[in-house]
Image: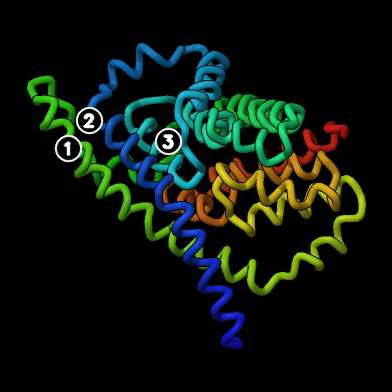
């Protein structure tokens, strides 16, 4: 390893962490708020019993949560521990990093005020969420968590607790959750930085010669770069002259749902078989959807 490549790896690693940590903090704080202020009874009333409506509500709940994919996994875990069905929590986990107003606005700005990119990105994300959520509702039983709340379950919600006590519990839970998922973020950021340092973009460009291969290359690139969904559109737009619109949409949707950082977070929280089956569904649907995008 040359000193130049080591410095490049180091700077990319630190920049990924600096970019991701604020969103992880938002995620674990929201997770703490859900733990201390939302009861299982509330969740049971909110989430419809019908599986399609549950997936639909999970999909569009993402509009209300400006969460990056860096911070969405702990929120999804907390929702599952609160009794939210797996298919609804997964639908939320897939769309929240994409269809929230902050991400859609950054996409609009990055592509020179083009609404079509925003609609394609949001529309494909919703399609992936609905299709994958419905398939999972039939295929998997239970919440698929490795541990069903063995850590963090001592922060119970008591009606007698004051607002300040609940707030204190929220902060304690957020700290626990941050150190729980933080190690996966650090490992993921390091792997992403190493791949960015040693895999040349020119190699990827040489592979992506047709619609299918260019979408696959851009999906692979989005996984490797592990960008936060709030900023990935600015990177994607830099490839506008090289890659088709469909492959850029594949980059914007797949990378916000699956990258090195949140893959490791998911593997730390969910059962491995569930994680890889989910990723396979996401990849197939994103690829198929990207081939339908014309522009």
What residue is rendered at 61% in x and 88% in y?
A: 2
Q: Mark 3: few, some, or many residues within 10 Å (few <14, many ≥20)?
A: many
Where residue 15 sits: x, y (%)?
50, 62
Residue at 87 percent of width and 32 percent of height: 294
Q: Secondary structure at mark 1?
A: helix
Label of residue 169 in the image: 1
Measured from the top left, where is residue 178 in percent x and y?
A: 32, 50
Secondary structure at badge 3 equals helix
Nearer to me, 162 or 147: 162
Q: Can the viewer see residue 139 in this picture?
A: no
Residues tagged 3 and 1 counted as in contact (Cβ below 8 A): no
The part of the image, by quadrant, that contains residue 99 is: top right
Check if mark 2's residue and mark 1's residue have beta carbons within 8 Å: yes
The local secondary structure at tag 2 comes to helix
What whole-number distance in Å separates the C-alpha atoms at marks 3 and 1? 19 Å
* Pointer 2 with pointer 3, Cβ within 8 A: no
Q: Which residue is mark 2?
A: 36
Which label number is shown at residue 3? none
As drawn, is 295 to the left or to the right of 64?
right
The disc placed on residue 76 is 3
Residue at 56% across, 73% down: 9
- The mark nearer the N terminus, 2 or 3, is 2
Measuring from the top left, give residue 241's x and y in whole percent.
Answer: 85, 50
């Amino acid at each position: 390893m040359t000193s130049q490549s080591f410095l490049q790896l180091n700077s990319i690693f630190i920049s990924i962490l600096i970019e991701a940590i604020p969103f992880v903090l938002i995620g674990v704080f929201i997770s703490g708020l859900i733990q201390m202020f939302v009861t299982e009874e509330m969740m049971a009333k909110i989430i419809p019993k019908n599986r399609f409506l549950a997936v639909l509500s999970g999909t569009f709940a993402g509009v209300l949560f400006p969460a990056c994919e860096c911070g969405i996994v702990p929120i999804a875990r907390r929702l599952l521990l609160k009794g939210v069905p797996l298919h609804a929590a997964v639908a939320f986990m897939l769309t929240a990093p994409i269809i929230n107003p902050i991400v859609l606005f950054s996409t609009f700005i990055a592509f020179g005020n083009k609404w079509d990119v925003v609609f394609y990105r949001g529309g494909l994300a919703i399609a992936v969420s609905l299709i994958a959520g419905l398939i999972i509702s039939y295929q998997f039983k239970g919440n698929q968590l490795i541990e069903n709340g063995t850590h963090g379950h001592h922060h119970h919600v008591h009606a007698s607790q004051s607002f300040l006590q609940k707030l204190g519990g929220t902060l304690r839970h957020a700290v626990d959750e941050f150190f729980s998922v933080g190690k996966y973020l650090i490992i993921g950021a390091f792997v992403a930085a190493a791949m960015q340092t040693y895999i040349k973009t020119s190699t990827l460009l040489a592979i992506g010669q047709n619609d299918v291969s260019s979408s696959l290359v851009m999906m692979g690139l989005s996984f490797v770069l592990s960008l936060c969904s709030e900023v990935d559109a600015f990177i994607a737009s830099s490839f506008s002259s090289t890659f088709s619109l469909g492959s850029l949409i594949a980059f914007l949707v797949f990378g916000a749902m699956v990258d090195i950082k949140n893959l490791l977070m998911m593997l730390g929280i969910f059962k491995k078989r569930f994680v890889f089956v989910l990723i396979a569904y996401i990849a197939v649907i994103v690829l198929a959807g990207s081939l339908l995008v014309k522009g």
